[in-house]
Each structure stands twice: as C-alpha cells, then as structure tokens.
Amino acid sequence: MEDKVVRFSVSLPESLLKKLDEKTLDKGYTSRSELIRDFIRELIIEEKWEKDEEVVGVLVMIYDHHRRGLSEKMLEVQHSRVHNILCTTHVHLDHDSCLETIVIKGKPDLIEEMVTKIAGLKGVKFAKLVKTALV
Ligand code: NI
C-alpha cells in the first residue's frame, strides 16, 4: 500500500532547531524528516505498549545451559504461550553459554509476564526485551 508523503511546516525556537540538526547528524540520519518520522513511530509504539494494544516483543537472553532444569523451565513457559511465539533462535555462544531470541506477539501484559518469568530463572545471565509494534 502506497503511503503518500505530505509536506508540512513546523515552527520551532531556533535553539531547538539547532538541537534537532545536531541529533540528525549524531544519529546518522540523512534528513530532519527521517529523524522526525522515526521519532513519531517510536511514540506510537510506546503508546501501544501503554494502551494494551497488540504489540511485538523480542526477548534477547544469555543463559548457562549447564544449569539443571533451566532449559526445561524455559520451554515450559514458551509452550504455555505457544500461539504468541512467532519464532526463536538459539546460538551456542561457547562451552557454557547459549544466546536465545524469542519473538513474542500479543498484549503487553502477556509479553511482560513471560519475560519476567524467563528472566527470573536461575542461570539466566542476561535478559532484555525490545519493545516494538506494527506502525
Ligand atoms: Ni546452546
């Protein structure tokens, strides 16, 4: 679906415009418009997470695969929400550690509950949730 691009003008204090241009450069954007588009999308995603709409979360974690029972417990949590899990990736980082990503679609509460359960398991050394959504 083609989304027509519309131009509009914005009034800003000069000092704020200067900061906008600095951010545009710092973040490697080629134009102010690109930065503003991404910023608006971020706001919409944030709002979706706050308003209990359907969202997508990507959980990245590193865990000790020697920890007794950990893999089983993690799989148990995932199988209890099998319809919400879009995919998982497993990477063997070294002899002891595995990195896993789980892409979860659903309501924010459900995703956060799953992430809390998994992150709280003994042997999970790192767990971070990236919050996104269709915009
Ligand atoms: Ni592994």
Image (spheres, rainbow, N blue to C red):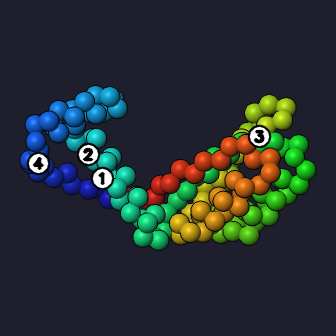
Up/down of 6 relative to 66, above or below: below
Callout 2: 10 Å neighbours few (<14), some, many (20+)?
Answer: some
Q: In front here: 84 or 53? A: 53
Residue 30 visible, this orientation: no
- Of all residues, the one furthest to the right in this rendering is 68
Q: Can you identify the residue that label 2 sits on?
A: 36
Mark 2: which secondary structure? helix
Mark 3 sits near ligand 1, with its Cβ under 8 Å away: yes
- Quarter of the image for residue 120 reads bottom right
Q: Callout 2, which amino acid?
A: Ile
Mark 1: which secondary structure? helix
Residue at 66% in and 59% down: 116
Q: Can you identify the residue that label 3 sits on?
A: 98
Mark 2 sits near ligand 1, with its Cβ under 8 Å away: no
Instruction: Identify the mark nearer the N-term, 2 or 4.
Output: 4
Mark 4 to mark 1: distance in Å? 14 Å
Q: Can you identify the residue that label 1 sits on?
A: 40
Instruction: Identify the mark nearer the N-term, 3 or 2.
Output: 2
Q: Callout 1, which amino acid?
A: Ile
Q: Can you identify the residue that label 4 sits on?
A: 10
Mark 4: which secondary structure? loop
Mark 1 to mark 3: distance in Å? 35 Å
Q: Quadrant of the N terminus?
A: bottom left
- Residue 125 at what x, y percent from top left? 73, 42
Mark 4 sits near ligand 1, with its Cβ under 8 Å away: no
Mark 4 to mark 3: distance in Å? 48 Å
Callout 1: 10 Å neighbours few (<14), some, many (20+)?
Answer: few
Instruction: Identify the mark nearer the N-term, 4 or 3.
Output: 4
**Cβ–Cβ below 8 Å for labels 2 and 1?**
yes
- Residue 118 at what x, y percent from top left? 72, 57
